[in-house]
Structure formats: C-alpha cells, structure tokens
Image (cartoon, rainbow, N blue to C red):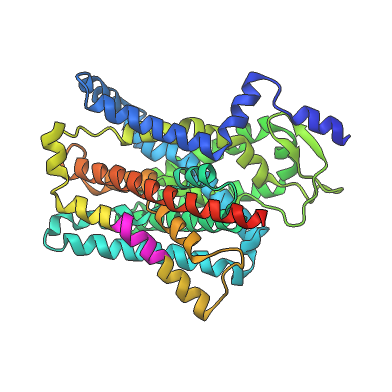
C-alpha cells in the first residue's frame, strides 16, 4: 500500500510537475521578482500607457460595492489567497508545531513585534517635518514571506532548520500585525452589519471545515464546491464593511483544523500527495491538504499578479529617479527596512532570550542578523500599504513604491551575502 501511495503521489503528468514546482519557495520567489521586474520595465517603456490602461480597467457589480479596477482586484482579492495560506500556516504551527509551546514561540513573536515597532518609529521620525507624509509610517512594517523564504532556500542549504522556522514565524506574525494595522489605521469607516455578517460566515466556514474535514481531504472537489463559496461570501462582506478584505483570508485560514498527533500512510488524490488519516478519521489534517492544493495558485498566480500590478511605477526617467532618492519618504522607508528591521528583530530577540526564554541551541546571532536583514524585504504587504497610504498616481504613491522596491532588493542582497558566509561556516562544521 505504501509503495502504491508513493507512485500515485509522484508528479507524473506535466500539470502535476508544474504544481509541484510551484510549491517550492525558490520558484514562488522567482515568479514574484519576475512579475515585479516586468511591470517596472513596462511602466517605464514607450508602451506605459497600455500598462496603466489595463491596470485601471474596472470590473464587478457596483450595487455590491465590487466595481473595482483590475489593480484593486489584485490587491483586495488575489492577495486574500496569500493571506489565507498565512492563516493556515500560523494555525498549524501554533496547533501542532514547535510554536505550540509558549517558551518556543515567544522568541520569534517578540522578534516580529520589534521588527514592526522599530521600523515604524524610524519611518515616522523621518517624516515628522512633513505631516502630510506621516500616513506612510506603516509601509515598512511587513516582511514578504515568499521572497524572504526563497532567498533563504537558495543560499541556506546547510543553515540550521530552526532558522527557517524562526523566519517563517517572524514573517507570518509581522504580516499579521501589518494587516491589523491596516484594519485599525487604514479603515476610514466601518459598516457594522456587513462586518458582523462576515464574521458570522467565517464562523460557519470554520464549523463546516472542522465537522467535515475528512470529507474535504478525501474529495478535493468538495472544498471548491462548499468552502470556496463561503470564503467568497466572507471576503465580499468584509470588503463591504470597509475593513480591508485580505483580513478575511487570514481569519478563514485560522479556522481550518490542524490536527495534533496525526498519522500518514496513504494517498487520497494525486493533487494532495500523502494524506493524513487515523483509523477513525480523527487524524485527518485539512490544513495540510488545503495548503498543499492552494499554494500553487498563490505562488503561481495570485502573488505574481498582485506584484505585477502593484510594482508598475512610472519613475520618470533619470530625473524622476533622482527626485525619488531625495524625497524624505524614500529615506524613511529605506532606513526603516534596511536598518530598522534587523535592529528591531535582534534587540527584541535579545530581550526575549534574556528575560523569558532561551534561543534554539543551533542558532547563532550571526545567523539571526542575516534573517533580520531578510525581514527587510517588505515587497508584497509593503506595496499593499503604500497603495492604501497615498492616492494612486500621486508623487508620494510612486516614491513610496520606488523606496519599497529599492530597500527590498538591497536587504535581499546584503542578507544573501551574510547568509552565504554563514552557510559555508555551517557546512564546514558539519564536515568536521
């Protein structure tokens, strides 16, 4: 039976091979970077008018407040898929992972808090003389999980496994904090009834997912037929409430059951691979199943399309670029991401390990410095906050995006250099 399961789970068809590739961190990160690069080049080419015309095409049903541009659909809709996976990963880690123990979880959570607070303070300090720019204080608070993990996967073949878990938790928590900031500080008005209805649908979604988890694992089509419409309803109601709709994705992800003490011995469908099933069905792990099925959609379509429409900034040639790099908003965002992120993360980690918990024995401060710099890759959520902070097409809107892209690339390059050196060090240690 195990041999049969292994054969059936192997990616035999081109479609299965493609989905398997899209589950790799390196592939998702490469697609994200490629989409952003294509958008930036197109937006500054002689054909830039066509790019912006496509981005601004409006689609949707106006009476439901869903008449949005394609760019807005990407930011509000497709990015909810990404945050759904964030919610699932957090739920799984806190339910069955190492983070279910407070002593283990407190260090990366504290690091995430410091990695949000310090960059926000640094950015705000740079903007104090320009009160009209202070709305952008939250732009450098988030870390791009896909991009950061992709860099770590490329350069970190011999780095401690605990370092990846630390980065995943840190990035997921500070993205969650950034989304909370969006809900509190970037929501102008809240419609109570749609918000209450959205939360009600999320509760129903979670109850159904928990009650019929085995059914949804064994039949891939059932989740699309039953859970997807409920998820769309929750998203639409959250959007109508005035709260940023991506929050619905996080809440829905948190409701998915992640089973503790599961066993694995067979394959339910070729798309899922080995499923998780106990003798009485209590070991069914719906979180793992949905994460496995949806990640290719997120990495291969949702996040790259968002990056494509978010990263297209008309720089205005060399003069525009020079102007962007003399703007206080650029200084604030870049200093916050490149300096504030690692400083906040390392300081918070030191405090947490000194007063509440110890650091994993396999980790060294030099490793954490590299991860702190990786966290300066703001990209996805930072671009989203930039969209919300300033009016599309304004100077501040474009400058903020240039700053985010520049800081993210610099942080990635510096982090990759440090982590490459650390990887060589750990490789030598393993050979001794």
Look at 36% across and 28% down and name the residue there: 60
The extreme front residue here reads: 432
Q: Can residue 374 be seen in this view?
A: yes
Relative depth, front residue between 40 and 185:
40
Q: Can residue 391 be seen in this view?
A: no
The extreme bottom residue here reads: 355
Q: Is residue 125 shown above or below 193?
A: below
Relative depth, front residue between 212 and 170:
170
Q: Residue 327, how many percent across, how many down?
A: 14, 49
Look at 42% across and 37% down and name the residue there: 77
- Displayed quadrant of residue 39: top left
The extreme right residue here reads: 1
Q: Residue 346, how many percent across, how many down?
A: 43, 67
Instruction: Verify whether residue 317 appears in magenta.
Output: no
Quadrant of the drawing holding the N terminus: top right
**Relative to 148, 207 lies left or right:** right
Look at 48% across and 52% down and name the residue there: 421
Relative depth, front residue between 59 and 418:
418
Quadrant of the drawing holding the C terminus: bottom right
Relative depth, front residue between 414 and 129:
414
Question: What secondary structure characterizes most of the magenta part?
Answer: helix
Q: How many labels does the image show?
A: 0
Q: Residue 296, how many percent across, how many down?
A: 56, 33
**Relative to 302, 379 lies left or right:** left
In the image, the segment drawn in magenta is 336-345
Q: Residue 363, how many percent across, how many down?
A: 56, 63
**Relative to 47, 303 lies left or right:** right
């Amino acid at each position: 039976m195990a041999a049969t399961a292994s054969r059936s789970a192997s990616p035999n068809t081109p479609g299965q091979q493609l989905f398997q590739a899209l589950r790799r961190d390196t592939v998702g990160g490469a697609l994200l970077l490629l989409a952003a690069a294509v958008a930036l080049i197109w937006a500054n080419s002689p054909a830039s008018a066509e790019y912006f015309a496509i981005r601004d095409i409006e689609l949707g049903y106006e009476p439901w407040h869903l008449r949005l541009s394609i760019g807005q659909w990407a930011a509000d809709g497709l990015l909810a898929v990404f945050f759904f996976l964030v919610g699932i990963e957090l739920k799984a880690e806190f339910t069955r992972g190492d983070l279910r123990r407070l002593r283990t979880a407190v260090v990366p959570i504290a690091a995430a808090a410091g990695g949000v607070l310090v960059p926000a303070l640094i950015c705000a300090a740079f903007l104090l003389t320009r009160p009209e720019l202070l709305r952008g204080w939250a732009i450098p608070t988030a870390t791009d999980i896909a991009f950061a993990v992709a860099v770590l996967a490329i350069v970190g073949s011999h780095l401690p496994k605990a370092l990846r878990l630390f980065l995943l938790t840190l990035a997921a928590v500070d993205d969650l904090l950034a989304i909370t900031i969006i809900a509190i500080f970037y929501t102008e008005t809240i419609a109570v009834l749609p918000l209450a209805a959205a939360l009600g649908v999320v509760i129903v979604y979670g109850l159904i997912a928990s009650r019929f988890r085995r059914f949804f694992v064994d039949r891939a089509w059932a989740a699309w037929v039953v859970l997807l419409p409920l998820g769309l309803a929750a998203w639409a109601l959250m959007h109508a409430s005035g709260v940023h709709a991506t929050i619905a994705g996080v809440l829905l992800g948190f409701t998915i059951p992640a089973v503790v003490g599961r066993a694995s011995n067979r394959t339910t469908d070729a798309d899922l691979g080995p499923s998780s099933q106990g003798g009485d069905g209590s070991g069914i792990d719906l979180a793992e199943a949905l994460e496995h099925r949806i990640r290719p959609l997120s990495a291969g379509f949702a996040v790259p399309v968002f990056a494509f429409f978010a990263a297209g900034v008309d720089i205005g040639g060399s003069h525009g670029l020079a102007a962007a790099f003399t703007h206080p908003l650029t200084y604030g965002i870049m200093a916050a991401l490149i300096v504030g992120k690692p400083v906040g993360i390392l300081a918070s980690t030191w405090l947490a390990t000194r007063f509440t918990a110890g650091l994993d024995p396999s980790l060294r401060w030099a490793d954490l410095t590299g991860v702190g710099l990786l966290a300066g890759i703001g990209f996805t959520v930072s671009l989203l906050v930039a969209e919300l902070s300033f009016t599309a097409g304004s100077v501040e809107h474009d400058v903020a995006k240039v700053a985010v892209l520049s800081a993210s690339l610099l942080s990635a390059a510096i982090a990759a250099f440090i982590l490459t050196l650390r990887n060589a060090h750990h490789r030598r240690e393993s050979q001794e």
